Every structure is written in C-alpha cells, then in structure tokens.
Amino acid sequence: MSRSGADRIAAAIADVRRRARWQVDPAVRGPVPLDRLYQGVNVAHTAVHDLTLGTAARHLVEQRYVNGPHTVEDLWAEREPLAGLLFWLCEDGLAFVRAGDILPRRRFTAAHELGHAVLHRDRMGRFLADPAISESDDATDEREREANRFAAELLMPGEVIRARAEELKREHGRCPRGVLEYRLAAELLVSGEAIRYRLNTLGVGND
Ligand SMILES: [Zn+2]
C-alpha cells in the first residue's frame, strides 16, 4: 500500500477515535470499544442470520429503516451469502455482519465495514457487499485492502501490542510469539489469524 494510503487510514482511525472521545491507553486492558466507535460516527450495525442482500433488505423494511418494501424490492431475491454489508440510507450508514460467525470474526467484519463507511463513502453506491473478508491485507481490490488494514489497525492498536510484548519480556526475559499471540487474541477479541498477521506487519514478538 502506498504511503499516502497508509497515512489516510491512520488519519481516518484518529478521526474515528476522536469523534468517539476514546483514545488508546495500554494501561487499560480489554478489547477496543467497537460499539462506541460506531456511535461516534453515527453508523448503526446489526447482526443478521443467513446474511444476503435479500435478508438485509427484509431487515431494513421490518425495522422501518426504509419507507416500504418498494424501496428495496430489487434486492429481495438476492441470495449470495455475505460476510458483511454496508448500506447507505440517505445520510445514515447501516452495517450488517453475519450472525452465525464467531465473535472475533464478527468484530473484524464490523471494523472492516466501519472502514468502508469512513474511507469509501464517495466510492460506493447505495451499498457495498462483502461475500468474504480476509483478515490480512492481501485482497486484490484496493478498497478491500484498505478496509482490512483499517480494521486491523483499529482493533489491534500498535501501542497495546508493543506494551504487551514489553510485559512478556519483563516476565520471561524474552517474548515468545505464540504466547504473545494467545494473550493478545484473548484480550482484544480477535482471531489467531488476524493477530498473527498484525504481529508480522509490526515485526513484534520473537525470541
Ligand atoms: Zn469490504
């Protein structure tokens, strides 16, 4: 990813944290407060079983996000399974994640969709559908790479990772990668795959 792309993502993350009045503090343990960050940018999010454009459209009608079925009836028959989806209704964003996924996966998807909401509003139409989301930044589409990077940096702050690596070194005199991965995945509620990729990117954690 280009330097300017990386800077744009870092700036977007700083903006999301500022709007939620939340900052990273490595002295405080626990996952990044994703609900609070969503509220800060006025985007809603919800989990839907068997997520497709069709089930999302039904949700929009049932929850009265739209004025009647005719506004989304073109999506009614869409059945492709989706991991995540971001919808725009005038000025309001609504992110969907697949309810059947395990929590770390749902959190990564939600953070990915939040990335689309703040980075790609002017580069998407009425909605942006994600059939699958990788937890690395190896996606071929630039928007997907950016959303993945946004999610990784948002959910796994570098300051927290480096602080936990230092703690391990103080305890054991070294920083075994496997122990660090296990602790960070449990604290930050992210998958093993996501934290491994993030540690590789940061070059943190080894003997
Ligand atoms: Zn995406």
Image: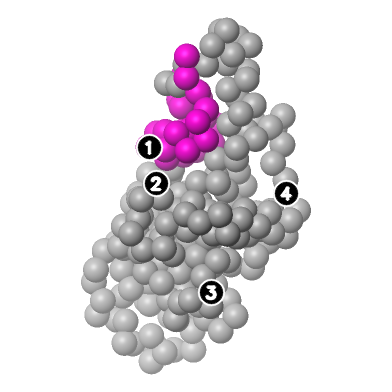
What residue did someone put label 4 on? 22
**Is residue 67 shown left or right of residue 20?**
left
Q: Position of residue 42 (x, y in %)?
A: 64, 68
Is the C-beta separation of discs 1 and 2 under 8 Å?
A: yes
Q: Name the amino acid type tagged 2.
A: Ser
| Location of residue 87 with respect to 188 vertically, above or below | below
Q: Secondary structure at mark 2?
A: loop
Mark 2 or mark 3: which comes first in sequence? Answer: 3
| Location of residue 165 with respect to 197 vertically, above or below | above
Q: Secondary structure at mark 3?
A: helix
Mark 2 or mark 4: which comes first in sequence? Answer: 4
Q: In whole angstroms, how far apart are the C-alphas of marks 4 and 1? A: 26 Å
Does residue 20 appear anywhere in the picture? no
What residue did someone put label 2 on? 136
- Pointer 2: residues within 10 angstroms few (<14), some, or many (20+)? some
Q: Name the amino acid type tagged 4.
A: Trp
Please give the range of residues in magenta.
179-207
Mark 4 or mark 3: which comes first in sequence? Answer: 4
Q: Name the amino acid type tagged 3.
A: Arg
Colouring method of the image: one colour
Is the C-beta separation of discs 4 and 1 under 8 Å?
A: no
- Mark 3 vs ligand 1: CB below 8 Å: no
Q: Nearer the viewer, mark 4 or mark 1?
A: 1
**Quarter of the image holding residue 131?**
bottom left
Q: Is residue 22 magenta?
A: no
| Location of residue 170 with respect to 196 vertically, above or below | above
Residue 193 is tagged as: 1
Q: Name the amino acid type tagged 1.
A: Glu
Mark 4 or mark 1: which comes first in sequence? Answer: 4
What residue did someone put label 3 on? 121
